Image (cartoon, rainbow, N blue to C red):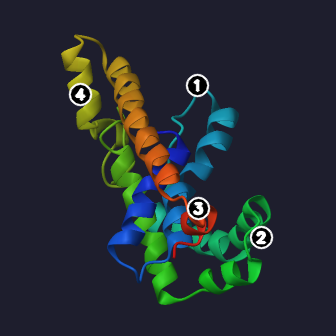
């Protein structure tokens, strides 16, 4: 999977395609599925995979959506305002709970799942209806086949490949926004 921060470009470019979408909602939606990764991995290391309910459409668009909206509304303005020295009142206004914010969070979540899907050797996308180990990402298969290796090697190479691409796109986004850089990157307009 791409490093969580490398999901940023998808949210950023989505906000450019439709000005009604709320950049903070897209961003929080695009990272919220990974809040389960570290705790699950540390607690159950070696027992279960590091993705579960927030990487399924069912869990992501219910529990994940609620979490994304709440984090966007109550944590994002203070945290981003403090780190990047942005106007917290403006952030509070942008992060108000509206139908556009909720839709933006949902779109960010779906894009996260779709960006992760091709890489993984297991996918919880259709859980509880489909066994995650039966839904193997096409890039993981491609690289495993290309390298005549097992699926875990394919997964690692696919993850590195997508991470490098997304990192390059992220660098391009950051350096192309010279005027009011932090405002454009975190508030969106």
Can you identify the residue that label 4 sits on?
141
> Does the CB distance between marks 3 and 2 fall below 8 Å?
no
Q: Nearer the viewer, mark 2 or mark 1?
A: 2
| Residue 56, visible in the rendered structure | no
Q: Position of residue 103 (x, y in %)?
A: 43, 78
Which of the marked residues, 4 or 1, is nearer the chain's N terminus? 1
Can you identify the residue that label 2 sits on?
78
Query: To which quarter of the image does residue 121 belong?
Result: top left
Q: Nearer the viewer, mark 3 or mark 1?
A: 3
Q: Position of residue 14 (x, y in %)?
A: 37, 67
Q: Nearer the viewer, mark 3 or mark 4?
A: 3
- Find the distance from the CA under tag 4 to the CA under tag 2: 42 Å
Q: Does 148 sit above or below residue 136? A: above
- 82 sits left or right of 175 in the view: right
Q: Position of residue 128 (x, y in %)?
A: 38, 55
> Does the CB distance between marks 3 and 1 fall below 8 Å?
no
Can you identify the residue that label 3 sits on?
181
- Find the distance from the CA under tag 4 to the CA under tag 1: 22 Å
Q: Which residue is at a point 58% across and 72% down the rendered structure image?
A: 187
Q: Could you say whether the residue bearing mark 3 is in a helix, strand or loop? A: helix
Using the image, tell me which numbered label, if any, was put on residue 46.
Answer: 1
Which of the marked residues, 3 or 2, is nearer the chain's N terminus? 2
- Can you name the residue that lies furthest to the front here? 179
Q: Could you say whether the residue bearing mark 2 is in a helix, strand or loop? A: helix
Q: Residues within 10 Å of mark 2 (few under 14, many from 20)?
A: some
Q: Residues within 10 Å of mark 4 (few under 14, many from 20)?
A: many
Which of the marked residues, 2 or 1, is nearer the chain's N terminus? 1
Which of the marked residues, 3 or 1, is nearer the chain's N terminus? 1
| Residue 24, visible in the rendered structure | yes
Q: Does 150 sit above or below residue 106? A: above
- Find the distance from the CA under tag 3 to the CA under tag 2: 18 Å
Q: Could you say whether the residue bearing mark 1 is in a helix, strand or loop? A: loop
């Amino acid at each position: 999977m791409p490093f969580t921060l490398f999901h940023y470009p998808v949210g950023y470019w989505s906000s450019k395609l439709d000005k009604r979408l709320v950049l903070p909602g897209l961003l929080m939606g695009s990272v919220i599925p990974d809040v389960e990764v570290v705790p699950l991995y540390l607690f159950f290391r070696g027992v279960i995979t590091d993705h579960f309910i927030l990487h399924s459409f069912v869990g992501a668009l219910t529990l994940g959506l609620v979490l994304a909206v709440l984090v966007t509304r109550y944590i994002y303005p203070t945290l981003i305002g403090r780190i990047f020295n942005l106007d917290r009142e403006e952030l509070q206004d942008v992060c108000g709970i509206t139908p556009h914010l909720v839709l933006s969070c949902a779109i960010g979540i779906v894009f996260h799942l779709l960006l992760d899907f091709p890489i993984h050797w297991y996918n919880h996308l259709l859980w509880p209806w489909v066994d995650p180990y039966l839904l193997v990402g096409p890039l993981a298969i491609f690289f495993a086949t290309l390298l005549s290796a097992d699926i875990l090697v394919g997964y690692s190479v696919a993850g590195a490949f997508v991470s490098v691409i997304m990192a390059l796109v992220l660098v391009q986004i950051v350096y192309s926004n010279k005027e009011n850089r932090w405002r454009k990157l975190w508030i969106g307009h």
